[in-house]
Image: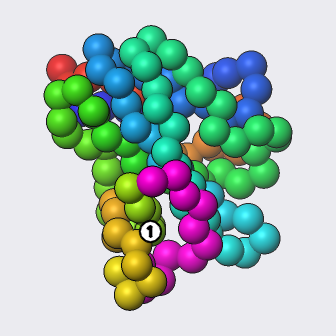
Amino acid sequence: MAASSMDASADLRVCNKTSSTIGLAIGYELKGDWYSEGWWNLEKDKCETVLMGILVKTRYLIHAIDYDKGGQWNGEAFMCTQDLEFKIKGTEECVARGFERTGFFEIDTAGKQDYTVQLTDQE
């Protein structure tokens, strides 16, 4: 599965350009600490604002699950998640703290204050 990006009118947004419903989790840095947060359910051809306001960092992390066909968008940046709605501080010892250790992929906003990520089907 592929991800691409384009400018948006506000905030950090994620758009589901697949034919499936997607479960989305994000990772971000705030005041020197990393947080993971989820889940947003994105219907096909819908977008969701996941962080509101001007983006002050250039690095954000995303993990997504294709609920209909299976498969994931993941990567080598590991963060903590859980099955239900969550906001978790820190990336260390996820399993020992009762969470899952999940791979996220990195988004580089290249210093833009607004950014949109497009999740697409594999080609």
Residue at the image point whose x is 45% and y is 41% from the top: 24
At 74% across and 19% down in the image, what residue appears?
9
For mark 1, what is the residue? 80
Tell me: 46 left or right of 7: left
Q: Per the image, is 19 magenta?
A: no
Residue 43 visible here: yes
Count of numbered badges drawn on the protein: 1
The residue sitting at the front extreme is 84
Placement of the N terminus among the 4 image quadrants: top left
Tell me which secondary structure the magenta stretch mostly adopts. loop
46 lies above or below 81: above
Q: 99 above or below 26?
A: below
Q: Amino acid at mark 1?
A: Cys
Q: Nearer the viewer, residue 85 or 12?
A: 85
Q: Is residue 36 left or right of residue 98?
A: right
Viewport quadrant of the C terminus: top left
Q: Secondary structure at mark 1?
A: strand
Q: Estimate the x, y position of residue 34 in percent, counting from the top left.
A: 61, 69
Magenta span covers which residues?
A: 84-94
> Left or right of 8: which side holds 64?
left
Residue 28: x and y, percent? 62, 58
Task: Find residue 86 and report its image quarter.
Answer: bottom right
Query: In the figure, 114 relative to 44: above or below?
Result: below
- Residue 118 in view of the camera: no
The image quarter containing residue 51 is top right
Q: Position of residue 61 (x, y in %)?
A: 50, 53
